[in-house]
Amino acid sequence: MPIHSSIKSRRHCEEEFKAIAYQVTGAAFELHNRLGQFFSEKVFKYELADACRQMGFSHFAVESPIEVTFDSFSKTYFADLLIEEGALFE
């Protein structure tokens, strides 16, 4: 099943991904504690992206389009947050 994205991506090794995930998850929990559970998801995504920028991540994208096709099927999904061109957070 071909998957296409207009965003440049790469595969991280396990150690790289774990380090990124640890930082992003920590920032997500901190934001959740600060903003509350009923805060707008759209605003939360952009706040999390800003927190990632402040942590020093140089590549991040919010609501990245990802197109999935198979035979006559084609659908575009939007990933919540893509960090360092390969760590996807939904």
Image: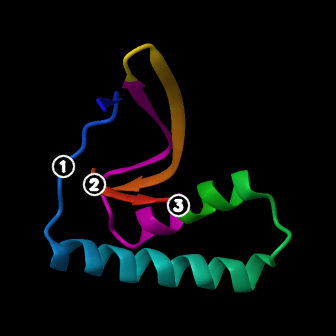
- Image position, residue 41 (x, y; %): 73, 57
Q: Are marks 1 and 2 in contact (CB under 8 Å)?
A: yes
Label 2: few (<14), some or many (≥20) within 10 Å?
A: many
User: Left or right of 32: which side holds 73?
Assistant: left
User: Left or right of 37: which side holds 74?
Assistant: left
Indicate yes or no whether the magenta region holds residue 51: yes
Residue bearing the label numbered 3 = 50
Indicate the quadrant where residue 22 lies.
bottom left
Quadrant showing the N terminus: top left
- Image position, residue 85 (x, y; %): 27, 50
Measure how far apart labels 2 and 3 are at the Cα level.
17 Å
Residue bearing the label numbered 1 = 10
Q: Residue at x 17, y 79 (%)?
A: 15
The one nearer the camera, 15 or 54, is: 15
Indicate yes or no whether the magenta region holds residue 50: yes
Indicate the quadrant where residue 83 lies.
bottom left
User: Left or right of 22: which side holds 27?
Assistant: right
Query: Given this view, does label 2 or label 3 mark the residue nearer the observer?
Result: 2
Query: Label 3's element?
Result: helix
Query: Label 2's element?
Result: loop
Residue 40 to residue 73: above or below = below
Residue 82 to residue 18: above or below = above
The outermost residue toward the top is 72
Residue bearing the label numbered 2 = 86
Q: Residue at x 25, y 37 (%)?
A: 8
Write the start and end of the magenta stretch as one range: 49-69
Question: What amino acid type is highlighted by mark number 2?
Answer: Gly
Question: What amino acid type is highlighted by mark number 3?
Answer: Asp
Lower sequence index among marks 2 and 3:
3
